[in-house]
């Protein structure tokens, strides 16, 4: 083995998990941001966490509203995931721009993509500064799933979005 950087390590551990962190903007519309750095934290109580760059609009909205839905995108959303990961909700209606059909979920006003395999509705408990990111630690209000939909993963870092098959 030879010494590598952490970004190279993150490419070698592909495929990486993938979610769209859904939040609401002040006008009530949804913002969607692609996030690989999320994890389960606890099953008792149910808790998850995700890390977002300090500059992200999503982070700003989560700190303001304390609410988010992690929507694990299903097959069919490959291009939208790439788009939602390269534009900011500060100046873009991502669902409109990338043609994402939105749907309602129980327990929240935040809309999520209709093509979702798992949705985790959560409330921000606290956030911690971690270098150039904040780590958002959340309690889970509700989890919903549709196993008939195929999950997407991020391959070779963020460069490819596809199923694990
Ligand atoms: C596949 C993929 C995974 C990503 N994972 C993360 C991540 O884990 N954390 C992060 O801060 N940004 C991640 N990004 C980049 C954000 O999605 C990107 O900065 C986005 O513009 C943020 O949008 P916002 O400003 O509307 O929040 C990822 C992008 C892609 C394409």
Image (spheres, grey):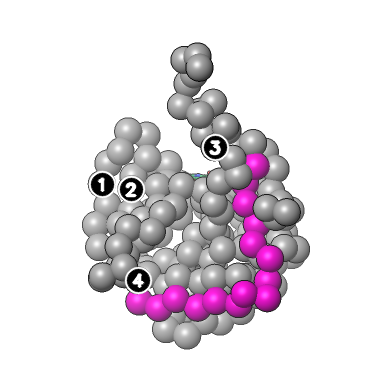
Q: On the picture, is 5 further left or further right than 44?
A: right
Q: Are marks 1 and 4 in contact (CB under 8 Å)?
A: no
Q: Residues within 10 Å of mark 1 (few under 14, many from 20)?
A: few
Label located before the other in sequence (4 or 2): 2
Does residue 131 sit above or below 5 in this rendering?
A: below
**Depth check, front residue: 63 or 17:** 17
Mark 2–mark 1 distance (CA, rounded to whole Å): 5 Å
Mark 4–mark 3 distance (CA, rounded to whole Å): 27 Å
Q: Which residue is mark 3?
A: 13
**Depth check, front residue: 112 or 88:** 112
Tell me where residue 72 appears, x and y as whole percent. 56, 63
**Quarter residue 98 falls in:** bottom right
Tell me where residue 109 appears, x and y as whole percent. 46, 80
Label placed on residue 140: 4
Tell me where residue 146 appears, x and y as whole percent. 60, 77
**Depth check, front residue: 35 or 75:** 75
Mark 4 CB near ligand 1 (8 Å cut) = no
SS under mark 1: strand
Label located before the other in sequence (3 or 2): 3
Q: Which residue is mark 2?
A: 135
What's the magenta region?
Answer: 141-155
Q: On the picture, is 90 further left or further right than 121?
A: right
Tell me where residue 43 appears, x and y as whole percent. 31, 68
| Residue sitting at the far bottom | 106
Label placed on residue 128: 1
Mark 1 CB near ligand 1 (8 Å cut) = no
Residue 150 can be seen in this image: yes
Q: Residues within 10 Å of mark 4 (few under 14, many from 20)?
A: many
Label located before the other in sequence (3 or 1): 3
Mark 4–mark 2 distance (CA, rounded to whole Å): 16 Å
Does residue 69 show up magenta in the picture?
no
**Quarter residue 75 falls in:** bottom right
């Amino acid at each position: 083995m030879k010494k590598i950087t952490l970004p190279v390590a993150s490419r070698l551990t592909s495929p990486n998990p993938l979610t769209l962190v859904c939040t609401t903007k002040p006008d009530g519309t949804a913002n969607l941001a692609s996030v690989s750095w999320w994890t389960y934290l606890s099953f008792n109580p149910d808790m998850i966490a995700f890390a977002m760059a300090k500059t992200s609009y999503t982070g700003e909205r989560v700190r303001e509203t304390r609410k988010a839905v992690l929507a694990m995108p299903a097959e069919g959303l490959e291009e939208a995931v790439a788009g939602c990961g390269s534009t900011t909700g500060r100046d873009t209606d991502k669902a409109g721009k990338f043609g994402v059909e939105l749907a309602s979920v129980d327990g929240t006003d935040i809309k999520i993509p209709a093509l979702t395999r798992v949705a985790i509705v959560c409330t921000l408990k606290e956030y911690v500064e971690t270098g150039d990111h904040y780590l958002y630690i959340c309690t889970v209000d509700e989890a919903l799933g549709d196993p008939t939909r195929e999950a997407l993963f991020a391959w070779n870092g963020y460069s490819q979005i596809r199923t694990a098959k």
